Amino acid sequence: MSSTLHPNEWVNTEHALKYLGRAGSVPHREEGEAVLLEFIPKEVKRILDLGTGDGRLLALLRSERPNAKGVAVDVSPAMLRAARQRFRGDANVQVLEHDLEERLPDLGLFDAIVSSFAIHHVSDKRKKALYSEVHAALCPGGVFCNLEHVAPLSVALHRRFLEALGTTEAEEDPSNQLVRAETQLDWLREIGFRDVDCHWKWLELALLAGVKST
């Protein structure tokens, strides 16, 4: 749960609102989201969105799956307010406060679990544990799609990424804890996911996915 001692900058309202103000302008984000949407079956019944922010990704998913029930979790008070406003009056969406640094609560099983630029804010040890919890929370055949900010492969590529975002190293989020895409794909395979792959990538943005065996 949120705390004034939380090391994650996202519990800071000013930090969260600053992100919301520029989230839609992240280069190629819509491309990654479009590929993610392709991997979520239209007939899913329950979707869990980890680190939902203002609910952008879950709303996109439900635009073509209006009967799917969604559970959205986040730790930021500002993000939670924005998500609750977005889904106000929608009985099929539940927005909950939860810190991804803590073990996922028992929310039942899901046909799809997604995340968008959130998991890189937790420690590496916690990332791998969280992926195991995601695997356990999926129905057999369920899909996990993580549109993520991953570690750069070189200093030059990192500089290019920052330039594309119109930012500098001094302005980088201090709560970023980036891991290379290949490392995280190996984690997913070790946990037991099948069909693990990086389905889309642009510099430090990547779509990592896997399916729970039936």
Image: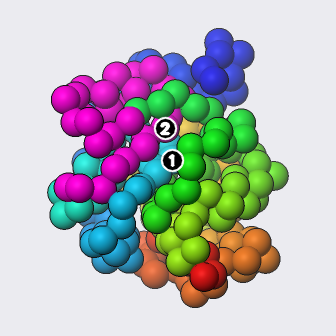
- Res. 188 image quadrant: bottom right
Residue 50: numbered disc? 1
Q: Which residues are magenta?
A: 66-94
Pointer 1 or 2: first along the chain: 1
Residue tagged 2? 73
In the image, what residue type sits under mark 1? Leu
Please identify the quadrant where the C terminus is shown.
Answer: bottom right
In the image, what residue type sits under mark 2? Val
The answer to whether residue 51 is left or right of residue 99 is left
CA gap between label 1 and label 2 equals 5 Å
Q: Position of residue 73 (x, y in %)?
A: 49, 38
Q: Position of residue 86 (x, y in %)?
A: 23, 33
Q: Is residue 86 in the magenta section?
A: yes
Residue found at the very far top of the displayed protein: 4
Q: Is residue 152 in the magenta section?
A: no
Residue 193: numbered disc? none
Marks 2 and 1: in contact by CB < 8 Å?
A: yes
Q: Nearer the viewer, residue 25 or 95?
A: 95
Mark 2 is surrounded, within 10 Å at the Cα level, by few (under 14), some (14 to 19) or many (20 or more) other residues, namely many
Q: Nearer the viewer, residue 180 or 36?
A: 36
The answer to whether residue 30 is left or right of residue 10 is left
Q: Tell me the residue at 37%/48% (across/down).
A: 70
Q: Nearer the viewer, residue 179 or 192?
A: 192
Q: Exactly how many numbered labels are in the figure?
A: 2
Q: Tell me the residue at 46%/81% (across/down).
A: 199
Please identify the quadrant where the N terminus is shown.
Answer: top right
Q: Tell me the residue at 43%/43% (across/down).
A: 71
Residue found at the very far bottom of the displayed protein: 195
Q: Position of residue 202 (x, y in %)?
A: 42, 73
For mark 2, give the secondary structure. strand
Q: Position of residue 87 (x, y in %)?
A: 24, 35
